[in-house]
Amino acid sequence: MRAVAKWGGAVLAVALAVAGTARAGDGGRRGALRDALRERYAEKIKTLRESVQAFYEARESGDKDAAMAAAEKAKAAYKDLPKMVQSKIDERHPGTTERLTSLQDEYDAEDDAPEGATKSASSDVNVTKDGNTVTKEGAYTGPNGNTATSESTWTRDGNTVTKEGTYTGPNGNTATQNATVTKEGNTVTRDGHTETSTGRSADSTDTWTKDGNTVTHEGSTTFGNGKTATREDTWTKDGNTVTHTGSNTGPGGKTSGVDATITKEGNTVTKDATYTKKDGTTVEQDATWTKDGNTVSKESTWTSSTGKTATQEATITKDGNTVTRDGHTETNTGKSWDSKDTWTKDGNTVNHEGSTTNQDGKTATRNDKWQRDGNTVNHEGSNTGFNGGTRERSGSFTGDGSGWKGQSGGSFKPSFKDDYDIFGGRGKPKPKAGGSGSRSSGGAKARGGRR
């Protein structure tokens, strides 16, 4: 259901855009009305996405009553959206209304439903260095043929680095970003400004200060509507123990936070942390890493205040030119994953093979090959999801002393069950734009990656 989640976010963006457009000339009431509409639409889209996912999970487990109830809830959530929002969603993702109103008819559909058509994405990135200035230019082509471009420069002058960037999306809208980072003594400050051609803007400032064994961070972002988000952190080292406390308050006034302690004793590192979400619920993490020769083992437990738990065990071993990782994750809801990955270096070539098997006995696989030839590194990789969806990708990166050039691409063929797109037809994966050197376009993992 990853495609549902991804494209559900796209639908939410359409809804928010409609809310802003509808109130564009409303004077002083514009901000309050738009915020109210955003909150209302966000909740309905969230219910819609969760209901669609619940339908497919119930369908796979054979619980027809639960599937029918989830389908009805999804249909009701969609119908409850204003007509102007529905029309905008259908305009961008044709067929949404029909699919949402016919979910119940799909319960008895055959599992070997037709697969989505293969699509591809590519990127072309050039990075050059001239004195104290680094320039990056990128062009990206998405799976539907849409293109986007970016151009950024970073310039260093003493203890100050400035960045200027311009990004143009497939719809012609642009965004500009300017930032300045300055180090003065034990203090680092960053000031940034971002604005879009659609009238949105954000101004941010962050300060990090080191005082002895303590580092503090304070930051804030003010948006074009006058609302502000704040963040603060403190890291303190005392012997072999590091503590971190932090909080983030969003423009809507809700706060999330972390309180963590990391301790090293001999070859063992332990972490005890409490994460507080914006809804007030908490998640406790207890983790231990132990090194024994060439082997590192990890044990971790996550416990939510809502009653959900998850445990994770992993072992990483280096033997000559081979590194292996074996992992096991399970939850108290009955889900589990067993994974195995192997990386082997042979001369200038590194090969990776991996697989994950879930609680239903289904297996996802992944393969990669990196090969260096002089100043060029070539990469080829593929993933197969639990339900047969595939991702293939390739990339080439070349350095010449004054910069580097990267080209990458990928093809995608989702299975019907693996990537069914309730918001626009079958087979619309959304790969991450790549070509930056650390990530290739089309490098998003197929459903069921390593855990």
Image: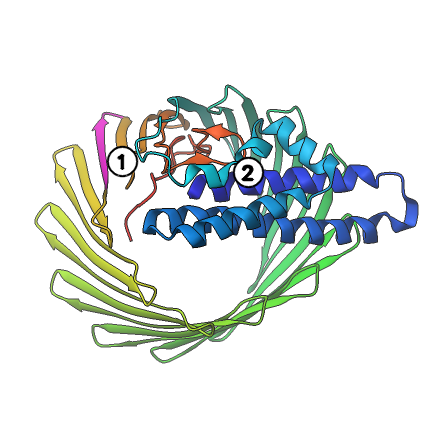
Q: Name the residue under label 2.
A: 100
Image spot of residue 158 (x, y percent): 57, 47
| Residue at x 81%, y 38% (from the top left corner) | 22
Q: In this view, does 388 lie to the left or right of 71?
A: left
How much space separates mark 2 and mark 1, taking CA atoms?
27 Å
Residue that protrudes farthest toward the right in the picture: 27
Using the image as rendered, state which of residue 371 and residue 274 is in the foreground.
Answer: 274
Quick one: label 1, few (<14), some, or many (20+) residues within 10 Å? many
Placement of the N terminus among the 4 image quadrants: top left
Q: In this view, does 326 lie to the left or right of 308?
A: left
Quick one: label 2, few (<14), some, or many (20+) residues within 10 Å? many
Image spot of residue 316 (x, y percent): 18, 57
**Please, which colouring scheme is shown?**
rainbow
User: In the rendered structure, which amino acid carries the disc numbered 2?
Assistant: Leu
| Residue at x 34%, y 42% (from the top left corner) | 447
Magenta stretch prevailing secondary structure: strand
Image height of 330 relative to 397, above or below: below
Residue 336 found in image quarter: bottom left
User: In the rendered structure, which amino acid carries the disc numbered 1?
Assistant: Thr
In the image, residue 161 lies in the stretch drawn in magenta: no
Image spot of residue 345 (x, y percent): 14, 39
- Name the N-terminal-most of marks 2 and 1: 2
Q: Name the residue under label 1.
A: 384
Q: In this view, does 221 lie to the left or right of 105?
A: right
In magenta, the rendered stretch is: 364-375
Image height of 60 relative to 137, above or below: below
Q: Can residue 23 be seen in this view?
A: yes
Q: Element type at marker 2?
A: helix
Using the image as rendered, state which of residue 56 and residue 428 is in the foreground.
Answer: 56
